[in-house]
């Protein structure tokens, strides 16, 4: 069955790896906000990086990725949305968009403790593994801790918690 998968988790939870595995199992296409941001915008990023600058651009990516997802889903191919989902409002916005367009979807939440996630990020930074796109400093990692909104009880009840 063709569907959209929303992959939710904080920095270092394993979203990219999980998304690739899910795409393989479901013969799907992954939309990764990190890939799009690196390709389209990183060369223009202010120094130091500004959160609102990045947020505006990730929202542009989200809009285009959702529009492209509808085309792909219409051809009978599943999509995996690895587009952040740090805020409940974003999760709700995307879920509403999918429901309004008659798309069947599943939300998968990668619930991984902070220490494990930092170890993964640090390893990815040093080894530049296959999911490495850019370095995530400890400062950025800690900032992400402050902006990630964990799933509420109602969201967890509807999600596959991994």
Image (spheres, grey):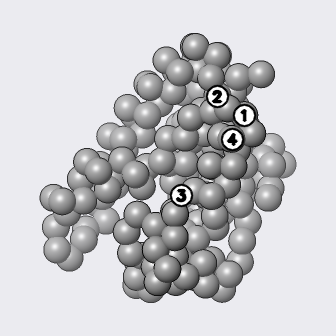
Helix, strand or loop status at disc 2: loop
Sequence-first disc among 2 and 3: 2
Q: CA distance from mark 2 to mark 3?
A: 22 Å
Left or right: where 156 falls relative to 34: right
Where residue 73 sits, quadrant-wise, is top right
Helix, strand or loop status at disc 3: loop
Q: Mark number for residue 78? A: 2
Residue depicted at x 61% and y 84%: 119
- Please tell me how crowded label 4 is: few (under 14), some (14-19), or many (20+) other residues with Cα within 10 Å: few
Determine contact: label 1, label 3, CB under 8 Å.
no
- Please tell me how crowded label 2 is: few (under 14), some (14-19), or many (20+) other residues with Cα within 10 Å: many
- Please tell me how crowded label 1 is: few (under 14), some (14-19), or many (20+) other residues with Cα within 10 Å: some
Helix, strand or loop status at disc 1: helix
Residue depicted at x 39% and y 75%: 135
Residue 14 versus residue 63 in the image, above or below: below
Sequence-first disc among 1 and 2: 1
Image location (x, y in percent) of residue 50: 25, 68
Q: Mark number for residue 26? A: 1
Sequence-first disc among 2 and 4: 4
Mark 1 against mark 3, which lies toward the viewer?
1
Q: Mark number for residue 65? A: none
Can the viewer see residue 107? yes
Q: Mark number for residue 86? A: 3
Sequence-first disc among 1 and 3: 1
């Amino acid at each position: 069955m063709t569907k959209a998968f929303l992959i939710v988790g904080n920095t270092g939870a394993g979203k990219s790896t999980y998304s690739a595995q899910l795409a393989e199992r479901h013969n799907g296409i992954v939309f990764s906000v990190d890939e799009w941001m690196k390709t389209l915008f990183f060369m223009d990023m202010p120094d130091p990086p500004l959160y609102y600058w990045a947020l505006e651009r990730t929202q542009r990516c989200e809009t285009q990725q959702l529009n492209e997802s509808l085309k792909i889903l219409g051809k009978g191919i599943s999509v995996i949305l690895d587009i952040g989902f740090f805020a409940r409002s974003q999760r709700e916005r995307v879920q509403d968009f999918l429901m309004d367009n008659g798309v069947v979807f599943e939300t998968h939440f990668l619930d991984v403790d902070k220490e494990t996630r930092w170890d993964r990020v640090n390893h990815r930074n040093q080894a530049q593994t296959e999911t490495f796109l850019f370095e995530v400093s400890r400062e950025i990692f800690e900032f992400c801790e402050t902006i990630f909104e964990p799933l509420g009880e109602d969201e967890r009840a509807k999600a596959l918690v991994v």
